[in-house]
Image (cartoon, rainbow, N blue to C red):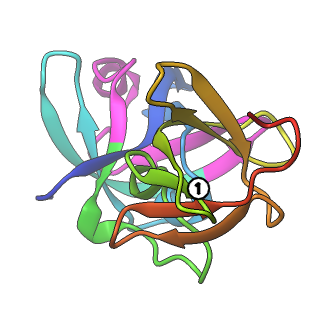
Amino acid sequence: MEGKLYNVAKIVNTHGVRGELKLVPQTDFPDVRFAKGSELLLLGPKGERLPVTVESGRPQKNVWMVKFKEFADINAAEKVKNWEVKVSSEDLVDLDEGEFYYHEIIGCRVFTEEGEDLGTIKEILTPGANDVWVVEMPNGKDLLLPYIDDVVVTVDKTAQKVTVRLMEGLL
């Protein structure tokens, strides 16, 4: 796996004695990532890298139980507790029109329809109904922009530019 790596999940515990692991997903595509045959990369706290292949995966409440071919029993699986599960940029899922990965939005400059530079998107919050883009303004303060059609007019990933229509009370 070459290229930039992106988070898919965090291994939080083992499950059972056959090497199954309990993962907290950090992806919008757990069905794809934890499907049989999916190739992932485990990253340890000291930079260890271990390529793995999914043997089976199933959701259980807010976690996923995943069995990797490389772990035959609990003793083998125990060694990767608290490791990160990653995927390379080549393996990212293609998104539909108007959908974006966080890494494509963070770092974009934000402008009003009138051309006023509001700052740079530094973070994306997911509080509920819609995402909220946190824009660091030139004065150092944060502007919270809801990602809704009434506010976000255009997103140009290539130019790293977002155009917004400010609703009353946002500034």
10 Å crowding of disc 1: few (<14), some (14-19), many (20+)? some
State yes or no: residue 62 in magenta: yes
x, y percent for residue 2: 11, 58
Q: In this view, does 149 lie above or below 23?
A: below
Q: Vertical placement of 45 versus 61: above or below? A: above
| Residue under the point 53% across and 76% down | 95
Residue 22 in sight here: yes
Is residue 63 found left or right of 162 in the rendered image? right
| Res. 23 image quadrant | top right
- Compared across the picture, whether 170 is left or right of 63 comes to right
Residue 4 versus residue 144: which sits nearer the camera? 144
Residue 127 position (above or below residue 120): above
Kind of residue at badge 1: Pro
Could you tell me which residue is drawn at 46 percent across and 45 percent down?
67
- In the foreground, 104 or 82: 104
Q: Quadrant of residue 8?
A: top left
The residue lying toward the viewer, choosing from 59 and 159, is: 159
Q: Report whether 159 appears left or right of 32.
A: left
Q: In this view, does 152 lie above or below 126?
A: below
- Image quadrant for the C terminus? top right
Residue at the spot x=35%, y=31% of the render? Answer: 84
The stretch in magenta equals 58-85
Q: In which quarter of the image is residue 42?
A: top left
Q: Where is residue 103 in the image (x, y as percent from the top left)?
A: 40, 51
- Quadrant of the rendering where the N terminus is positioned: bottom left
Image coordinates for residue 134, horizontal then vertical, percent: 59, 34
Would residue 20 be seen by someone viewing this image from the given angle?
Answer: no
Instruction: Read off the residue under disc 1.
Output: 30
Is residue 74 located in the magenta-colored stretch of the structure? yes
Image side of residue 113 versus residue 140, left or right: right
